[in-house]
Image (spheres, helix red, strand yellow):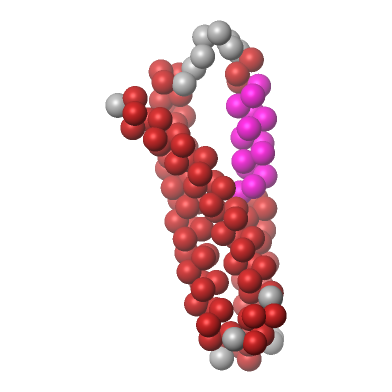
């Protein structure tokens, strides 16, 4: 069980990073010159990146729930005591900022797709 929890913990952090990178990559790719030159090629790629990023966000939430339930038993370090709570808060502020940045990029991407010129660029 401990190995599964450890794996879940690693995947939780990895999924958070994948979500943020996917959102930024999809946004930048959508705004790139490649989108203007070859929208039929780029748009499906952007959609795939967004789907993968969204899947990663769902994984982050599910694995974070598992991590929260098992933290005290598998990760708590007695030598660090209550100081590790401060570190966890700082870590989660950073990770939440990454998720928020990713959500902002996805919102901007959606706005780009709904803009008047998007229909011409996507066809």
Residue 45 visible at all? yes
Residue at the left extreme of this rendering: 1
Q: Residue at x 67, y 30 (%)?
A: 90
The magenta segment is 86-99
x and y percentages locating residue 39 in the rendered image: 58, 85
Q: Residue at horizontal 67%, vertical 53%?
A: 101
Q: Which residue corresponds to the image point at 44% horizontal and 47% vertical from the top-left?
A: 59
Mark count: 0
Residue 10 drawn at (x, y percent): 46, 37
Magenta span main SS: helix
In the displayed orientation, state which residue is furthest to the top: 79
Residue 96 in magenta stretch: yes
State the residue in front, 64 or 38.
Answer: 38
> In the rendered view, would you say 118 is above or below 101?
below
Q: Residue at coordinates 66% horizontally, 85% vertically from top-left?
A: 36
Residue 65 at least partly seen: no
- Check the image and report above or below for 63 versus 55: above
- Quick check: 72 left or right of 80? left
Residue 7, horizontal then vertical, whole percent:
39, 35
Q: Is residue 113 magenta?
A: no
Q: Quadrant of residue 63?
A: top left
Q: Quadrant of the N terminus?
A: top left
Asked if residue 5 is positioned above or below residue 82 in the image, the reply reads: below
The C terminus, quarter of image: bottom right
Q: Nearest the camera: 3 or 96? A: 3
């Amino acid at each position: 069980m401990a190995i599964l929890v450890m794996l879940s913990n690693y995947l939780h952090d990895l999924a958070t990073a994948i979500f943020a990178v996917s959102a930024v990559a999809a946004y930048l790719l959508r705004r790139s010159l490649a989108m203007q030159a070859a929208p039929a090629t780029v748009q499906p790629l952007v959609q795939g990146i967004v789907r993968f990023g969204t899947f990663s966000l769902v994984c982050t939430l599910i694995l974070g729930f598992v991590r929260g339930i098992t933290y005290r038993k598998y990760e708590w370090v007695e030598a660090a005591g209550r100081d590790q709570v401060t570190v966890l808060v700082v870590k989660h502020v950073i990770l939440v900022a990454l998720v928020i940045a990713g959500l902002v990029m996805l919102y901007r991407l959606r706005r780009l797709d709904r803009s008047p010129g998007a229909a011409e660029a996507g066809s």
